[in-house]
Image (cartoon, rainbow, N blue to C red):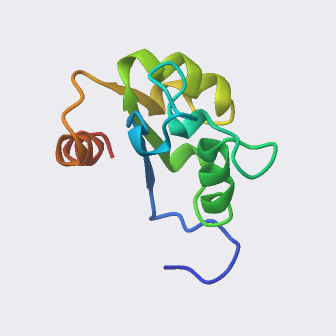
Amino acid sequence: MATSSTPTPELHAVIMAGGQGTRFWPLSRDGRPKQFLRLTGELTLLQQTLANIRPLIAPERVWVITRQDYVAEVRRELPGIDAAHVVGEPAGRNTAPAVALAARLV
């Protein structure tokens, strides 16, 4: 992994943001999953994740895999990410299918 704060052109990032966050209950609910919670300040967990990878990976190389019903909210939360890079899973089936979908897209 790069050690500088210059984006590395060959790297892509995939943010998996499809979970419901049941371990965060009662803060997290079906209508407000953990990725949309503001736990440590003004940024949501999703926005914090993007802020953490931004120094290493250019926005055009960031993909977000989420539940279909969260796509619009993710796009609102991350306006700097290409809308086509926010992908709703056809069916939530845990991590492996999300990784496979991301691998196919990247």
Q: Position of residue 77 (x, y in %)?
A: 66, 30
At horizontal 45% and vertical 42% (from top left) the residue drawn is: 63
- Residue that lies at the very extreme toward the bottom in this rendered image: 3
Q: Is residue 90 left or right of residue 69?
A: left
At horizontal 33% and vertical 46% (from top left) the residue drawn is: 106
Up-down relation of residue 91 to residue 3 (above or below)? above
45 vs 88, nearest the viewer? 45
Q: How many marks?
A: 0
Q: Quadrant of residue 3?
A: bottom right
Up-down relation of residue 27 to residue 31 (above or below)? below
Up-down relation of residue 56 to residue 51 (above or below)? below
104 vs 30, nearest the viewer? 30
30 vs 49, nearest the viewer? 30
Q: Quadrant of residue 89?
A: top left
Q: Is residue 58 left or right of residue 39?
A: left
Q: Position of residue 46 (x, y in %)?
A: 59, 43
Q: Position of residue 104 (x, y in %)?
A: 23, 42
Q: Is residue 80 left or right of residue 18?
A: right
Q: Position of residue 92 (x, y in %)?
A: 24, 29
Q: Is residue 43 left or right of residue 95?
A: right
Q: Quadrant of residue 91?
A: top left
At horizontal 60% and vertical 53% (from top left) the residue drawn is: 49
- Residue that lies at the very extreme toward the front in this rendered image: 26
